[in-house]
Each structure stands twice: as structure tokens, then as C-alpha cells.
Amino acid sequence: MFNKILIANRGEIAIRIMRACKELVIKTVAVYSDADKNSQHVQFADEAFYLGDSAPKESYLNIDKLINAAIQTGADAIHPGYGFLSENASFASAVDSAHVTFIGPSSDSIRAMGDKAESKVLMKKAGVPTVPGFEGLESEKDFEKAAKEIGYPVLVKAAAGGGGKGMRVVNEESELSEAIQAAKREALNSFGDERLLIEKYIADGHHIEIQVFGDKHGNLIHLFERECSVQRRHQKIIEESPSPLLTPEIRNQMGEAAVKAAKAVNYFNAGTIEFIFNPSDSTFYFLEMNTRLQVEHPVTELVAGIDLAQWQIRIAAGEKFPFNQSDFMQRGHAIECRIYAEDPSNGFLPSIGKLLQFIEPHGPGIRVDSGFAKGDEVTHFYDPLLAKLIVYAENRETAIQKMQNALKDFIVHGVVTNIDYMQAVLSHEDFAKGKISTRWVERNFSDWQPAKTEIESLISASLADLIFVNQKSKNENETDPFNPWKKINNFRN
Ligand code: ADP
């Protein structure tokens, strides 16, 4: 087993992994940038190593600095978390070359699944159903022909894509040319690669993904599904398990297809096969594989009864996974809400600033994976995810009720959050019925506005916190006195 693990990440996921390390009696090393000097993950670790400037390419995306940090601190393994370098095959190779263990799959598996077009070809060969479509097209004429053959609506998406970027739905031929240009531009800007693929757009599809888990000795199983259809701008905001939609037969078929997909790239460690599910005819298609731990892994941990982060570490150290498929079942229901510092009534614009108040909910069946505390600063450098709120109950109805109560008890002031928006989404009758396709949020909540009382509550909370912040700024010798009205004006803008 490892002696010391460096976590090449920040925020809630760094803390989540450190907890797993501590439970396995392994020492932890945090890495940090200028903006994160005082952040929670640095305080939680046994030791911390400074990387550099706040810009990700100078810190959390800098392979040389991270490898050097592992060597300097004597870490014998690196956990990449999610995002940043977690799906970067060159990083995994560089870690191996430095004789440090990468906690994740092999760099070959990462590479094979890293490209949407190439992985789709690979999956077709392996007999895993993929969305009808074409890869490797170049001219607009070819795209036009392909779209006709597939039948509108179609989706053009970046082969190198991620995070919903470089993706355009095209409803009819007249929109195609513009969509191709826009998707190419976005793909080039975000990934330095303008290759696009085109496929059938499954309108009112569900995003359902299967967790897979395997060891380095050839054992690989699945740990059931997560329903992730509640999305804004093709990005998940609420995830749950089990999916309210799947029958045991379809669940088995999807599980088997996921295992087949993972085995096709000799996969080990934790991974996720994402499918788009068409409820009108119960067909499902491979979208992509995420070769890392997912943001939404906690819902699987709760329902399947396994600590995925701990097992990732044990598998990386060479242990055999001692369980079979038949050792697992889904028990109860889990829901996760991603709590962001963002403004849902203003295009989900990130909201930055000091957390004047941050009170997490507690109670039976409530889990909060968070990376922030009162007084911390949310900066523009990184994803504004504050915390993941996860509830677990005996059935879906009780879990929804528990989540609504937990959201009420989650108090954040100083930045705008999506908590009230989440509350509105969860309270919708469609959600109660599980009638939630990937476009449901867009259709039902695009003109959502916070209740007026929120501004009033922000004013009173800001005033109530004045004493705390004044005290804190005196301690920190800050020259600028705190001005609560500035925050309120920002909020009004
Ligand atoms: P990314 O890697 O950018 O997140 P994905 O391929 O995983 O891209 O897709 C993100 C989301 O886009 C999916 O969860 C789904 O909502 C939507 N999507 C992707 N492909 C299709 C498709 N063929 N039909 C309908 N929706 C799709």
C-alpha cells in the first residue's frame, strides 16, 4: 500500500480523496496555487506544496510542476481527481515515467477513450450500440449529405469535446452551415482541434451512465446507473440513482454493454460509460467514456454501498477487487445537487466573492462534499462548484423530500447560488414523476427568477455578518473596510 498520496486537484474532490487516504492511513499532500493559499483542501492535507500562479496552466494543469511536487514530497502515488489533468494520457504516462503510481486507468485506456470520434469507432467494433452518425467528415457538402441520411434533428459535436462545448443541435438544413462554423470555432478555441462528428439528435433523450470498476487482474464489473438528465447547457446539475425510468431488463442490458465497452480498452480502476437513452423505444447508445472518478460518484457509493475513492487507491496499489457482480444490488435512492456560485437568472454567470455565511445542512442521510467554509473566497480562476449536496433515503419520494429540506437548510451568503433554482427544479411535478429529459430544464426554467425576498434576505444576512467580516478584516490587516452595499449592488446587477 502507498505511504503518501499527492492529490493533483483542489476543492471538494481533493478533500474527498484525502478523506479516503486518511481512512486507509495514508499521508496526504495537497498542491495549491496563489488563489488557493488558504483554501480548505490545503488545510485538510497533512502537507501542502505550492505550485505557482492562480492560472490553471501555471498550477493544476502544469505536468512538470506536479511531478516535481510528488518527487519533492516523497509521494508514491498521484490521484488526479476529476477535471484538470484527470483524463490527460500524457500526464498519466509522465507520472509512470517518474516511478510514481497514477491512481486511475492506464494511459492507453485514457488515450483510446479520449476522442469522441475514435472511441465511437472502437465501440462500434466492440459491438456496443452507438448513436447513428458519421465521423471524419470534412466538407460542408459531406455534412449535408450525412445529415440527410441520418434525418433531422442532428447534433454536430467536437471530437475532442468535453463540458458540453463545441456542440450544436441542428433542426433543419438551413441551420447546418452556421452550426458547423460555430461548433468548429468553439472546438478550436477550447480544445485546439476543430474536428467534428455528426449524429442523430435524440430529442427528449435521457442521459444515463453506468459506473464500471475493475482491478489490474482482469476483474471488471458495473455498479449500476446514474440518471443525469437534469442539465443546463449540456452540463449535469442533478444526478440520481436508480434512474426512475429503467426496467430491470434494460438496466441489465446497459450494464452488460458498459462492461463490454470497458473491457474493449482493457480498463481498470473507476470509469463511467455515458449513454443516451431514448424512452420512446427504450434504445440506448454509447456517448463517451469518462476515464476517471465522476463528480456524481457519491450517488453510486450510497446506493451500491461501496467507497469508490478508497477502492481506486487499493486497486492502484495492485489489490484484487474481491467482489463479483452478484455481490452488488441497488438499495434505496440517492440524489445529488451540485451547489454552484452562479446566477441562474443571469445565464448561469459565475458569482465571485467572499462567503459571508456558509452553513451546510446536517441530518440522517445527508452528505455534503464541500470545498468551502465561511470566510473563503470564490475566485474567477476555477469552476464555481461550492459543494455537492447528496441525500440518501429508502425510496425516491422520500429522497426528494429530504433534498428539499436539506436545500432549505443550506445557507450561503456573499455570492449568488443556484440553491433556490435547485429547489424550484426539485419541486416541479415532472421531476416527481421522473419525466425529465436532457432539455427539460431549458424548456421549463429558462426565464426563472428568484423570489424578491431573496434580495431582502441577502441584505439582512450581509448586515448580520458585518461584525464577522469586520472582525476578520481587522485580523487580516485589510485596508479596505467592508462595504455590504457593494455586494448588494453587485447582486442587483
Ligand atoms: P461532453 O463530453 O461535452 O459533456 P457528451 O457527449 O457527454 O459531451 O454529451 C453531453 C450532453 O449532450 C449529454 O448528456 C446529452 O444531454 C447531450 N447529447 C450528446 N449527444 C447527444 C445526442 N446524440 N442526442 C441527444 N443529446 C445528446
Image (tube, helix red, strand yellow):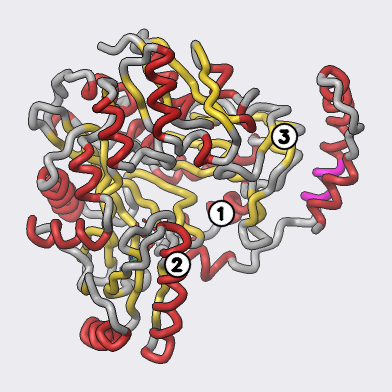
Magenta stretch, residue numbers: 453-459
Residue 48 is inside the magenta segment: no
Vertically, is 450 above or below 74?
below
Q: Name the residue carrying label 3.
A: 355
Which image quarter is the N terminus in? top left
Element on which disc 3 rests: loop
Residue 199 position in % (x across, y down): 27, 73
- Residue assigned mark 2: 439
Dot 3: within a 10 Å radius of its alpha carbon, few (fewer than 14), some, or many (20 or more) residues?
A: many
Sooner in the amino-acid sequence: mark 3 or mark 1: 3
Secondary structure under tag 2 reads loop
Q: Which residue is mark 1?
A: 427
x then y, percent, for residue 234: 44, 60
471 over 153 or under it: above or below: above
Give the foreground label among 3 and 1: 3
Tell me what residue is drawn at x 35 percent, y 24 percent. Answer: 78
Horizontal and vertical percent position of residue 318: 17, 19
First reached walking from the N terminus: tag 2 or tag 3: 3
Q: Relative to 385, does residue 343 appear above or below in the rendering?
A: below
Seen at 41% across and 31% down, the residue is 64
Is 3 placed left or right of 49 in the picture?
Answer: left
Mark 2 CB near ligand 1 (8 Å cut)? yes
Query: Which kind of residue does numbered mark 1 sit on?
Result: Ser
Q: Is residue 366 visible?
A: no
Q: Tell us which disc is closer to us: 2 or 3.
A: 3
Residue 240: quadrant of the picture: top left
Closer-to-camera residue (23/429): 23
Q: Secondary structure at mark 1?
A: helix
Q: Name the mark on residue 331.
A: none
